[in-house]
Image (spheres, rainbow, N blue to C red):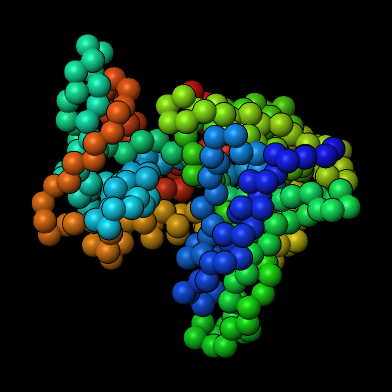
Amino acid sequence: MAYGTGFGAVQEVMDRARSSQSVAKVAHPADPRVLWNLGWKNGETKLVRFLSDAVLAIPMHAYTPTKDGGHKDFACTLELQGDLQRPCWICENMTKKVKTRNGDLIEVPLKPTPKVLGVVVVREEDEKGNVVDVTRELDILVDPNEPDGATETSDVPLIALVNQGQNFWRQVNGYYSSFRTTLDRDYSISRKGDRLDTEYIVIPQDVDDDYISFRKAERDQVAPIAGPALWDQYGIVRHGDEDPILEIVIKWIEAKGTKEWFERWLPITSGGVTAVADEAPARAGTSKFSGLKDRIARDYPKE
């Protein structure tokens, strides 16, 4: 299948990824410190391969205004575990303006919104019509056992975090329910619209020939077989029986909830901040979850 000009978006991803330089010394492109944050603009289409069916659902302060005039993602620290769990400065000090059903603007606390996070490899069609991994340049440790050792610049697969709401995952959930896994094929995902009027169109591609044997296995064994095969293919190290992709996502979330991250990007010493935005009518707060690992949405979350 030819993807045509719709994958001009992928070229932009490639250009940005190749021009970026990582500060951290890493042994693998799936390291949470350099994990690419993949998004879609209106009209963009991207091809991806999911690396785990164990996505994770958690309330996040996504695209939150920062003291430098930009936007960053933050974990709601009330939702974290252990030493990272504490009152959330954003919930207590930041506000936004929303429209009531009567059309009035009111100021309300900036509460977290439910997000679902997964990890993918970004793909593209090459000049010969073959589907291959998009690559990025990263400084990779020559010896993974020496975290402060020498590095060399390498072209590595573009492994990315997908941090989206339920309108993105709804269709993915449907295909997961039908195929019992998302790991045995690529998915073409397009975005239509902006802000609250956004729709995602998810189109599954043909089953990857390398995974036909997995499809012939018992249905409840497809995902457990395909997962380790993909992890081995991309050099993602497993520790015991833990899902390594889930561990990567948890580390990424926890890094967004550290005191250092909050103090670096938020005006914590200067009081509250108002983030003005046109929003839908005010609704009830977000739902609560238990521990991070208990928030795994193996059957992709539905509305």
Residue 105 x/y as whole percent: 19, 23
Residue at position x 47%, y 31% from top?
A: 194
145 in relation to 218, above or below:
below
Residue at position x 63%, y 29% from top?
A: 201
Residue 172 x/y as whole percent: 63, 32
Residue at position x 88%, y 52% from top?
A: 128
- Judge left or right: residue 99 versus residue 119: left
Residue at position x 22%, y 52% from top?
A: 86
- Judge left or right: residue 119 versus residue 183: left
83 in relation to 106, above or below:
below
Choose top left, top right, bottom left or bottom right for residue 242.
Answer: bottom right
| Residue that extends furthest to the top in the rendered view of this protein | 102
How many dots with numbers? 0
Choose top left, top right, bottom left or bottom right for residue 95.
Answer: top left
Q: Report whether residue 210 is seen.
A: no
Residue 69 x/y as whole percent: 29, 53
Residue 229 x/y as whole percent: 76, 56
Q: Report whether residue 190 is seen.
A: yes
